[in-house]
């Protein structure tokens, strides 16, 4: 691959990009031929010329090169640039890791540490008059939960992600002082090992040949839990305990998951997939515990003749069925052999599979993780009390911490379903039982009255002898599976049932009625219901109505009893659909205002508010810096409790490598501490600038909806000038891209909407409407808002970042795919005009002469990516043109999907 690159952040990064690029170039020559390599270089050079000046003579050569490509060359070229995108990302991630490692020196000078680190956050708190004791007290009650979902914006196969990890591991292993003498790090061996992995990656199919099923998504999410979180989360908790001098600090990071429980719009999720999600997670976490227990057994060879033990440890060892004479005087090993046997039996009970390494004898399985932890604690107490603090923070301590965090369930699974489905199921139950013939015809108060009466009654509605719609039976089976999971794995297994499209209190009461039908909600003890119904407010109208909806819900005894028992009412707010509904600016402002309004409701009810932020990777779906996003939340809305979805490609980008994952968990923790204990004066700033923000929001929504929902031909333009039609063939998720067979924008899911605009480099959901909104507004006030108000500053920074990844010159080439040339020119012209207005506004507010002028490091990183992203855009356009002209050769489809894959990898947060 060519070694010419754009300016990069540091010399090491430049060196690694060149190393990996040269390595790939050698592989392409050997595996694909010199001709393919030459074509790749020619297209790259022409693409750079096109970017500089589309009218130049070298740029005009691009069109000829593309049209002259035969299919094998086109596919090879797309494959080459896509692989280079992946390799360059490895170098960039490692550069980020090196920057983070320099922060470890911040303990010597905490004031110099970045605020999204442990030391930086504590320093920020200190300037606000807060102490480590304040941080300790907050974290003792905190819940910080990244929730992994299977939303389809991750285009990489797990096999590809594994190769990326292998290459990164080789680089990491040889990136330490004196590594040249280590096995595998001698120069020739080092290059040979890298070359081997590069060949495997080059010859690995980058796109899926078959569609994903839910179990595939479960396995992918669990692989991250197993490979990353089982290691990183306990280490993070241990470090915060040491730093805050709080050895008993309970876990505050709780990993959540949606895969297997999120059935909104996914007909493939059912009771079996829910059970599979639980058992797959249990299999991974129990095997980790088995491996660690086995390793401790090998290590703790202390003899009773040389080491005193506590009576509790002696009793535990004495109760062991281990009859080996070799361990007769080794109480720790005898105890661990018994623990291992019980754990192996637990593995078989919970997963249906025998432990990979059989126990020496049969034993009784644990009835829950608390019993397992209690026996481990006996070992630790004996070691510490008899041999000192050197045993207080070791491998055994890490295992105990892991049990505290992950239990036997690994991740807390959410349930989610659309409110329309619940209404139909409840109506079916009422009809079959003779209680109400037409529930869906009732007004809201009549529905609430009927539901409240049933929730107070001990009778069940379901009759095994009656006939029900298949949808009703399916929903009931899922909730029965949830009840089984709770009985098997304990209360942390499932905590929340999210209701999409919530616009009324009855939407939540319907969930409690359905939980009652499977024994999870009991009228005589409503506060003991293990699952809380949580509304998801998604559209602009729903966000504006969130306050009265929640107020009405909390007037109902059933909902209030569950909330009071927890002390918390969870509410999910959706970034994606609100953006698609009303523009990025409007969505961001309405989310801000809804959060403040919801806090008023919960405070009036004597409850804490727990917001669950449904964010995606792209700015148009709430993406951007998690730390900045948390810190910029309205005052009082975090208060130590926050949940955030981590979706699609974001999971691999933020949690694909232990060091990167640790940085992101610390950033979430730091953001939560600062937002909770030293928040900016958001109330004061909202009072001062809120009227201006509201006017901007209204104007932005008007401009956005005029284009997207009112402009004649816009839908045709969108479906022709983006690869939306081709994305459905990428097989990146188990659920359909659209809610219905309709072609309306309203019925399209937010993810393919955002993903399509990212591919065509317009990035419309991340900026459109802002330029029109600020026309005529006092620039000086906007500058003050951008400087002083974290809410507005974060909005501008996110918009600036996504606009830096946009390219309206390339977008113009996508517009040529529109069958009606006049329509293509007209709509692209409107997009370009608004982009120019928005860019000018952002630069004026920031006082800069170019985008990201105030963020030079990010600017360099994005510029570095473009030389290998842009050729993929050009190849994608050419192949889409051929396919839509009737070329149905499977290789055309393959080339398109490779180009889609490569662009997504290069942009990194595209869906």
Image (cartoon, helix red, strand yellow):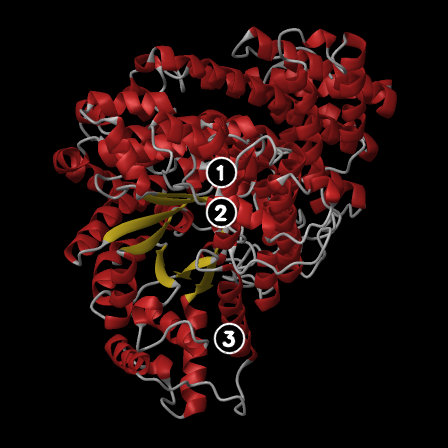
Q: State the residue position of label 2.
A: 312
**Residue 382: which disc?**
1
Percent coordinates x, y for residue 680 in the rendering? 21, 30
**Residue 476: which disc?**
3
Relative vertical location of residue 531 with respect to residue 614 in this rendering, above or below = below
Q: Is residue 767 visible?
A: yes
How many residues crowd mark 3 within 10 Å: few (<14), some (14–19), many (20+)? many
Relative vertical location of residue 833 with respect to residue 703 in this rendering, above or below = above
Relative vertical location of residue 8 with respect to residue 493 in this rendering, above or below = above
Q: Along the line of sight, which residue is nearer the eye, 377 or 47?
A: 377
What residue occupies the far front of the structure in this picture?
A: 305
What residue is shown at x 49% (from left), y 45% (from top)?
311
Q: Answer with the quarter of the image where residue 395 lies.
A: top right
Q: CA distance from mark 3 to mark 1?
A: 48 Å
Q: CA distance from mark 3 to mark 2?
A: 46 Å
Whichever of labels 3 and 1 marks the residue nearer the N terminus, that label is 1
Percent coordinates x, y for residue 247 in the rendering? 38, 34
Q: Secondary structure at mark 1?
A: helix
What residue is shown at x 25% (from left), y 80% (from top)?
449
Side of 681 where 150 appears, left or right = right
């Amino acid at each position: 691959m060519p070694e010419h690159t754009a300016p990069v952040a540091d010399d090491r990064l430049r060196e690694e990009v060149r190393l990996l690029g040269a390595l790939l170039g050698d592989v392409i020559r050997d595996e694909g031929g010199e001709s393919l390599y030459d074509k790749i270089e020619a297209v790259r050079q022409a693409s750079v010329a096109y970017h500089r000046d589309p009218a130049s003579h070298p740029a005009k050569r691009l069109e000829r090169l593309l049209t002259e490509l035969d299919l094998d060359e086109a596919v090879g070229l797309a494959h080459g640039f896509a692989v280079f995108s992946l390799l360059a990302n490895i170098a960039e991630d490692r550069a980020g890791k090196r920057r983070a490692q320099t922060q470890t020196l911040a303990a010597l000078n905490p004031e110099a540490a970045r605020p999204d680190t442990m030391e930086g956050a504590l320093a920020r708190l200190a300037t606000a008059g807060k102490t480590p004791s304040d941080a300790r007290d907050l974290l003792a009650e905190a819940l910080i939960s990244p929730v992994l979902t299977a939303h389809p914006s991750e285009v990489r196969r797990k096999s590809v992600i594994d190769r990326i990890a292998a290459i990164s591991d080789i680089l990491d292993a040889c990136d330490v002082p004196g590594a040249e003498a280590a096995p595998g790090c001698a120069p020739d061996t080092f290059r040979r090992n890298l070359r081997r992995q590069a060949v495997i990656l080059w010859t690995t199919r980058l796109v899926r040949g078959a569609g994903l099923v839910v179990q595939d998504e479960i396995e992918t999410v669990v692989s991250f839990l197993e490979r990353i979180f089982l290691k990183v989360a306990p280490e993070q908790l241990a470090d915060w305990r040491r730093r805050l001098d709080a050895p008993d600090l309970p876990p505050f990071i709780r990993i959540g998951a949606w895969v297997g429980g999120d059935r909104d719009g996914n007909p493939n999720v059912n009771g079996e997939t829910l059970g599979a999600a639980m058992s797959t997670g249990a299999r991974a976490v129990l095997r980790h515990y088995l491996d660690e227990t086995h390793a401790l057994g090998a290590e703790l060879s202390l003899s009773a003749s040389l080491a005193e033990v506590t009576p509790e440890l002696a009793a535990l060892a004495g109760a062991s069925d281990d009859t080996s004479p070799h361990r007769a005087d080794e109480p720790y090993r005898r105890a661990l052999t018994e623990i291992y046997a019980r754990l192996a039996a637990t593995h078989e009970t919970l997963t249906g599979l025998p432990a990979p390494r059989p126990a020496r004898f049969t034993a009784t399985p644990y009835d829950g993780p608390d019993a397992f932890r209690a026996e481990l604690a006996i070992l630790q107490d004996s070691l510490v009390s008899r041999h000192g603090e050197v045993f207080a923070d070791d491998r055994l301590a890490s295992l105990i911490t892991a049990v505290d965090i992950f239990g036997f369930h690994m991740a807390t699974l959410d349930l989610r379903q659309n409110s329309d489905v619940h209404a139909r199921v409840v109506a079916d139950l009422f009809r079959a039982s003779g209680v109400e013939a037409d529930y869906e015809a009732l007004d809201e108060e009549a529905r609430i009255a009927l539901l409240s009466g049933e929730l107070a009654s001990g009778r069940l509605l379901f009759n095994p002898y009656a006939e029900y719609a298949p949808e009703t039976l399916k929903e009931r089976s899922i909730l029965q599976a949830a009840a089984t999971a709770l009985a098997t794995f304990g209360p942390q297994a499932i905590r929340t049932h999210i209701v999409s499209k919530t616009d009324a209190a009855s939407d939540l009461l319907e969930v409690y009625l359905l939980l009652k039908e499977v024994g999870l909600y009991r009228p005589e003890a409503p506060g003991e219901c293990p699952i809380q119904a949580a509304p998801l407010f998604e559209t602009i109208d729903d966000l504006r109505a969130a306050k009265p909806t929640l107020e009405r819900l909390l007037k109902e005894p059933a909902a209030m009893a569950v909330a009071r028992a927890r002390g918390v009412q969870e509410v999910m707010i959706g970034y994606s659909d609100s953006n698609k509904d009303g523009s990025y600016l409007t969505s961001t402002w309405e989310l801000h205002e809804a959060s403040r309004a919801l806090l008023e409701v919960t405070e009036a009810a004597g409850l804490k508010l727990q917001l669950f932020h449904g964010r995606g990777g792209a700015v148009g779906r709430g993406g951007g810096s998690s730390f900045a996003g948390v810190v910029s939340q309205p005052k009082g809305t975090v208060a130590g409790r926050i949940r955030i979805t981590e979706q699609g490609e974001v999971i691999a980008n933020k949690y694909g490598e232990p060091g990167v994952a640790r940085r992101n968990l610390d950033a979430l923790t730091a953001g939560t501490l600062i937002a909770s204990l030293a928040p900016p004066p958001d109330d004061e700033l909202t009072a001062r600038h809120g009227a201006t923000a509201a006017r901007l929001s209204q104007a932005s929504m008007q401009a956005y909806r005029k284009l997207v929902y009112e402009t004649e031909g816009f839908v045709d333009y969108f479906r022709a000038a983006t690869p939306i039609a081709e994305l459905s063939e990428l097989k990146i998720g188990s659920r359909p891209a659209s809610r219905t067979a309709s072609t309306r924008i309203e019925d399209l899911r937010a993810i393919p909407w955002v993903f399509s605009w990212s591919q065509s480099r317009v990035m419309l959901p991340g900026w459109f409407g802002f330029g029109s909104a600020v026309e005529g507004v006092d620039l000086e006030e906007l500058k003050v808002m951008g400087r002083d108000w974290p809410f507005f500053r974060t909005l501008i920074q996110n918009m600036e970042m996504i606009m830096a990844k946009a390219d309206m010159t390339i977008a113009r080439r996508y517009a040529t795919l529109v069958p009606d040339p006049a329509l293509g020119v007209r709509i692209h012209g409107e997009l370009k005009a608004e982009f120019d207005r928005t860019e000018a506004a952002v630069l004026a507010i920031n006082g800069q002469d170019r985008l990201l002028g105030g963020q030079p490091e990010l600017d360099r990183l994005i510029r570095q990516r473009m030389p290998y992203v842009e050729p993929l855009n050009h190849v994608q356009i050419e192949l889409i043109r051929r396919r839509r002209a009737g070329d149905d050769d499977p290789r055309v489809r393959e080339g398109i999907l490779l180009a889609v894959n490569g662009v997504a990898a290069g942009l990194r947060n595209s869906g």
